[in-house]
Amino acid sequence: MSTDWLLGVADAVAKLPAPPAEQFLYLLDHGTAKIGLYAPRGTDPQGPHQRDEIYMICRGTGSFERNGERRSFVTGDVLFVPAGMAHRFVDFDDDFAAWVIFYGPPGGEASAPVEDSPG
């Protein structure tokens, strides 16, 4: 796992294992957060996870199913999935890739807001 604090998409994609291996690689972790790159090919076989997660689409387009609802996404979009919820990418481009961030405790975080701002 990298100790670098700047992750580039091209460098991360180059580190992914060759298909048919799972196209996922953790690149950074800190505290409860683990950051990786996910770039499935053909189909997305994933199921629910134990922790909350955020996907940031870094290239490609497609659709995302979450708890029975399907929505389209494009490069630059951000998707949130609470712990334990069924989800997967569908109808995505051959060059699709997304950053994935897992964080918080197993079972997910409480929904109480925390006030943070970039300023």
Image (cartoon, rainbow, N blue to C red):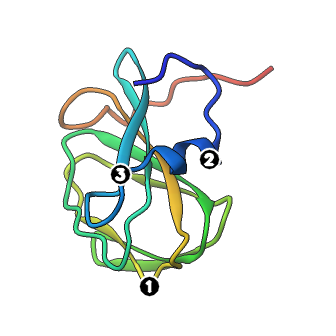
State the quadrant of the N terminus: top left
Mark 2 Cα within 10 Å, few/some/many (few <14, many 20+)? some
Residue in the image at 35% along x and 50% along y: 24
Pick the residue in front: 25 or 66.
25
Q: Are marks 1 and 2 in contact (CB under 8 Å)?
A: no
Numbered disc 3: secondary structure? loop
Position of residue 11 in the picture relative to residue 66 (left or right):
right
State the quadrant of the C terminus: top right
N-term mark: 1 or 3 = 3
Pick the residue in front: 2 or 98.
2
What amino acid is at disc 2?
A: Val
What amino acid is at disc 3?
A: Pro
Q: Nearer the viewer, mark 1 or mark 3?
A: 3
Residue 96, given in percent of the width and then of the height, sits at 53, 68
Give the labeled residue for mark 2: 9
Q: Which mark is residue 91?
A: 1
In the rendered image, the vertical position of residue 56 relative to residue 33, given as above or below:
below
Give the labeled residue for mark 3: 17
Pick the residue in front: 100 or 114.
100
Pick the residue in front: 17 or 96.
17
In the rendered image, the vertical position of residue 86 relative to residue 38, given as above or below:
below
* CA gap, disc 1 and disc 2: 21 Å
* CA gap, disc 2 and disc 3: 15 Å
Residue 13, given in percent of the width and then of the height, sits at 52, 51
Position of residue 108 in the picture relative to residue 62 (left or right):
left
Q: Residue furthest front?
A: 18
Position of residue 76 in the picture relative to residue 111 (left or right):
right
* CA gap, disc 1 and disc 3: 22 Å
Residue in the image at 35% along x and 57% along y: 23
Q: Residue furthest right?
A: 119
